[in-house]
Amino acid sequence: MKKYILPVIILCMITSVGFAQSAQLEEEITKKEKAMYEAIQSGDMETFERNLSDEFVSIYSAGMVNKDEEIENINNLTMNSFELSNIRVMSPAENVAIIMYEVASDGEYMGDPFSGTFYSSSTWVKNDGDWKAIMHTETRAEPVGARAEAMDDYEDEEESDVEYEEDDENGSEEEEVDGDKVH
């Protein structure tokens, strides 16, 4: 029994160190992500730009943008308020962290008002001791049931694209999908 005590103590120490590092990473990445929103809100483009890697890409419903396009878009944005919630941070590899969260925000983009809740994630990479955002994506949160309705609409649309023709030679039906005939 005594010979198992030392390995159990060592395992407990390693586990507690891992949890502490995980909590520290979550705190650090959450702080970095919030700093980006604060920089946008205050118009501090120097801080915003400094936290983006050169390879940065954002993905939105309108498409993908690179670092320069993102900076241009943010220059056209006025953020009145934001609140991050349901934050989760994971580290799939050393020096890589992914933060996922919901953000409620409102403001104006190119003079058009916006407000709502968005599901967002950012990927951060640590190089030379400094975390830089390399990717960000967000999508508007939909009301409960909206996804099911959208899927129903999609399935209805696909069914309307299918046409059936009767084959004169052997009486079997052919299905035409997007202009291609299949049996």
Image: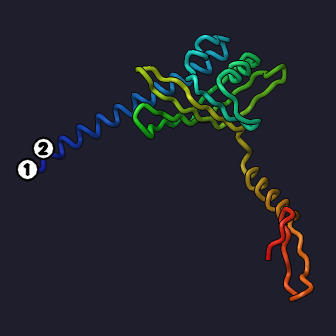
Q: Nearer the viewer, residue 162 or 107?
A: 162
Q: Is residue 146 above or below residue 125?
A: below
Residue at figure coordinates x 55%, y 25% from the top left: 33
- Residue underneath mark 2: 6
Q: Position of residue 47 (x, y in %)?
A: 58, 13
**Which amino acid does the dot numbered 1 rest on?**
Lys
The single residue placed furthest to the front in the displayed view is 169
How busy is the neighbourhood of tag 1: few (under 14 within 10 Å), some, or many (20 plus)? few
Q: Is residue 119 above or below residue 84?
A: below
Q: Position of residue 183 (x, y in %)?
A: 79, 77
**Which amino acid does the dot numbered 2 rest on?**
Leu
Residue at figure coordinates x 78%, y 53% from the top left: 150
Q: Nearer the viewer, residue 70 or 8?
A: 70
Alpha carbon of mark 1 to alpha carbon of mark 2: how far? 7 Å
Q: Is residue 178 above or below residue 20?
A: below
Asked whether, in this view, residue 137 is left or right of residue 178, the answer is left
Indicate the secondary structure of the residue bearing disc 2.
Answer: helix
- Residue underneath mark 1: 3
Q: Is residue 181 visible?
A: yes
Q: Position of residue 149 (x, y in %)?
A: 78, 55
Residue at figure coordinates x 84%, y 73% from the top left: 175
Q: Quadrant of residue 94?
A: top left
Residue at figure coordinates x 60%, y 16% from the top left: 49
Q: Nearer the viewer, residue 68 or 181?
A: 181
Asked whether, in this view, residue 130 is left or right of residue 147, the answer is left
Q: Is residue 80 visible?
A: no
For the residues labelled 1 and 2, say whether their Cβ atoms are less than 8 Å apart. yes
Q: Quadrant of residue 141?
A: top right
